[in-house]
Amino acid sequence: MITCRDSLELLLEYAEGHLPDDVRARLERHFGDCSPCEEFLKTYRATPELCRKALAAKMPDGFAKKLTEFLRKETGQT
Amino acid sequence: MRLDGTQRTVDGAPVTEGTDDSALLARAQAGDVSAFETLVERHRNRVYGLALRMLNSEADAAEVTQEAFLSAFRNLKEFRGDAQFGSWVHRIAANFALMRLRKRRQQGETLESTLEGDGDQPSFNERGSLVDAVSDWRDAEGDALDAELRQAIESAAASLGDEYREVFVLRDLEGLSYEEIAQLTGASVAAIKSRLHRARLSLRAAIDRFYEDRST
């Protein structure tokens, strides 16, 4: 029988659809019977998208100006 | 539009021809520097973001961004049109960032590549059953991101060991394939997957703590 520990070890492969059919089916049966693991799976899946939103960065204006000046100098435009 | 906010004009009229990346690239390869400037303007935030998340240093990220675009400019002629300019310049930037991380490691400037203890890993009882309760994440479903949550994620990402953070940035933020990451980092696909899984668990735990604290 598959345990929660086994299930969570396989989350990455499961979330990316890389598991063999029989293992995936066993895992899905476990998630169906185990609400803590099902909740854990949902939050594990949501994590990359939340991180993408949180970690999007905009180059500070001062750096952008310096980048322009640097590239113009290096490419012989000044 | 150029990097300095002005727009290229001919006899006072704005030039609008060929404004997608591939058209701009073709013009840049033919020697039109303003076309290259437009490409830089379009991609600089994401290139900078990639470098910032990998290096945890604004100054280093700015330098890597400069190096990446200069390298792209110098190698424009070698670039073939079978890839996107954005993907190409991102890989150049990732390579420069990884070189800096390696140099830091050689100089002993980085922390050991371990995660912050087992607190970020799920807990199980002796029968292998999960004992952690998951917090209520319903607030995370909207488009807007809470400023405090953003800060919690930034802090958790910054505290990942370099080897975990670089894999997480390249896979989950940049969308590179495992094979591409293996090529860039020299690590095996199995090692990359293992690091990514642990990084995701650690970040998930940070987000879960944020919602748990909020509910109390």
Image (tube, rainbow, N blue to C red):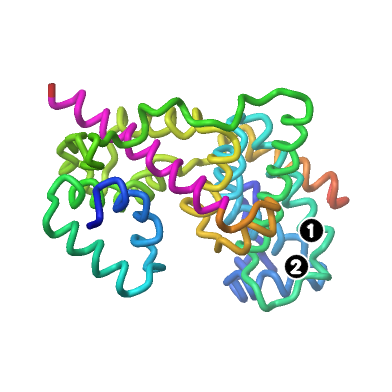
- Judged from the image, the secondary structure of the residue bearing numbered disc 2 is helix
Q: In the picture, residue B133 is in which quadrant?
A: top left
Which chain is home to disc 2? B
Which chain is home to disc 1? B
The one nearer the camera, B24 or B59, is B59
Q: Residue at horizontal 44%, vertical 25%?
A: B117
The residue carrying mark 1 is B73
The one nearer the camera, B188 or A4, is A4
The one nearer the camera, B18 or A6, is A6
- Judged from the image, the secondary structure of the residue bearing numbered disc 1 is helix
Cβ–Cβ under 8 Å for marks 1 and 2: yes
User: Mark 2: which amino acid?
Assistant: Ala
Mark 1 and mark 2 lie on one chain; the one further toward the N terminus is 2
Question: Which quarter of the rendering shows the C terminus of chain B?
Answer: top left
Q: Residue at horizontal 21%, vertical 64%?
A: A28
Whether residue B99 appears in magenta in the rendering, the answer is no
Q: Residue at horizontal 54%, vertical 40%?
A: B165
Apparent side of residue B175 relative to residue B127 in the rendered image (left or right): right
